[in-house]
Image (cartoon, coloured by chain):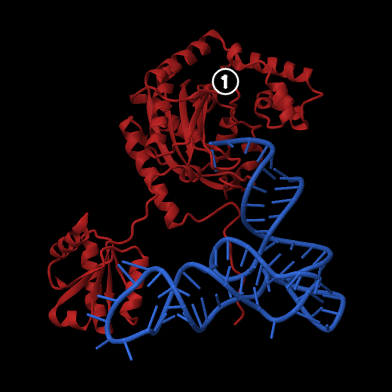
Chain colours: A red, B blue
Amino acid sequence: MPRSATIAAVKGFRDVLPEESRRWQALEDAARELFLAYGFGEIRLPILERTELFARSVGETSDIVEKEMYGFTDRDGTSLTLRPEATASVARAYIEDNLGHADAQARLFYIGPMFRRERPQKGRYRQFYQIGAELLGRADPLADAELLLLLARYLERVGAREARLELNSLGDETCRPVYRERLRKFGERHLDVLCPDCHRRLERNPLRLLDCKVEACRQVMADAPVMRDSLCADCAAHLGQLRALLDQERVPYVMNFRIVRGLDYYRRTAFEVVAEGLGAQNAVGAGGRYDGLVAALGGPDVPGVGFALGLDRLGVVASAGALASGPAAVILPLEERAVGPAFALATRLRQQGLSVGLEPAGRSLKALLRSADRRGARLAVILGEEELQVGRATVRDLVRGQDRRQVLTLDAPGPELASAVQALVGADG
RNA sequence: GUGAGUGUAGCUCAAUUGGCAGAGCACCGGGUUGUGGCCCCGGGGGUCGAGGGUUCAAAUCCCUUCACUCACCCCA
């Protein structure tokens, strides 16, 4: 029979296998625990939204909306899109579910997949996972400080030691246009040196001139006007208070006036978390303040601040959950007749919450022990002729290399079996 | 969307001027009765990414195509 063609995963979509998945779980568990301590509750958002939501929040002219979204037309003609980010959904939910009604501030976090049709490369996938937190209804710098403290503590908790926090202020609707104009004028004076990409940026988004990687552009832009000098009094005060609060709690960060955000809705506070070891995609997290977003979506004029962490990237950088552990014991039936009792033993131990492996019969004891060893099991439980006759299994400690012949009574109740195994596992800690 | 690189065993990779497709690791078995790891011996495994062309002969040369990777762009 001819073999049919195999089916591969869609480009940019991948399987997260158990080893990586285990690290992700550690990252997620840490997030749930810590975020709850800071008063954030988990929100589970739909993966599909109306396309209009992103057009109005992320920005009609952003790259994401212009060419990176996965969308389709539903049977009733509605244009739907796989979410490219979650802040827009949180804002939508805030409005739709009246989250500001009982309590003016809403503290929400989410964990889940996002979709963007970019060219895949290291640390960049078309389906990627984010952990994010949003604090709506608060315009004061304390809100920014709380969120950044949460972010810093979380990174510390999961062992993302090389990650560093970079902070900037993008100004607001009064001072940013002024700065943008100053930057444009500066760029126009240096047209001859700037790269073709920067010529384009000059028209569409002059702020992007700041993070061009071409050496000639960098040299020119080193003398460019800095946002800090263009901030209006209110924005400068906001930044100053935020920095004082961060300093008070010893949150490590550096100011980086070149940070620019790709999404249109950011105001004032903007930050990134960058790390080594990720190639060109070195941002593990980013966020900022988005005071106009909820209103732009037709809701009340409610401010907000938030961040998102890339789980795919964080998993590479963080040390949390890195240790694999094998099963406490593996049951080894030496012959066919031992299969039934071996199954029963494994089942009862597993029901007591122990991680227990079970091998099929038909191979030599030597081969069975080798399997148990390679799985990283602590104990091998041997069930052969002798053991069946006396009704007690032999337990071999694979770490110490010691046998305890016929110590495990097969018809003992589950809890008793489990504590006997536990005692053997904990024999030397 | 643009550019570069790579496709050979489960994994990492070799294969000289075109001349029988290999190694390490992994897997399975053995090294006297039921004892793992180290060592020794043996074994199973391949559409050489796919399709076409040149040739007595192609993993190797030519064309086409697909996939993956990295970088630009953009972003978490």
Helix, strand or loop for disc 1: loop
> Which quarter of the figure is the N terminus of chain A placed in?
bottom right
**Residue A128 visible to the viewer:** yes
Q: Chain of mark 1?
A: A
Q: Is residue A354 above or below residue A207?
A: below
- Which residue is pictured at 73% across the width and 17% down the height? A186
Please name the residue that numbered disc 1 is placed on: A170
Q: Is residue A295 above or below residue B45?
A: above
Asked where in the image residue A245 lies, by quadrant, the reply is top left
Does A43 sit left or right of A229 as displayed? left
Of the pair A239 and A158, the residue shown nearer to us: A158
Instruction: Determine the image quadrant of residue A176.
Output: top right
Using residue A54 as the reference point, say whether residue A202 is left or right of it: right
Query: In the picture shown, does residue A110 fall above or below A297?
Result: below
Quick one: label 1, few (<14), some, or many (20+) residues within 10 Å?
many
Q: Is residue A92 visible?
A: no
Q: Residue furthest top?
A: A233
Vertical placement of A208 versus A248: above or below? below
Q: Residue at x 66, y 27 (%)?
A: A208
How many tags in the picture?
1
Amino acid of disc 1: Leu
- From the viewer's perspective, tell me whether residue A321 is left or right of residue A59: left
In the image, A407 versus A403, the foreground residue is A403
Q: Please tell me which residue is depicted at 40% across the width and 49% down the height of the picture.
A: A322
Q: How far across and how far down the image is residue A120, in percent? A: 62, 48
The image position of residue A282, as x and y in percent, is 56, 38
Q: Can you give x and y, in whole percent of width and height, for residue A400 in the image?
A: 25, 64
Tell which of A177 and A241 is nearer to you.
Answer: A241
x, y percent for residue A332: 28, 74
Q: Quadrant of the C terminus of chain A?
A: bottom left
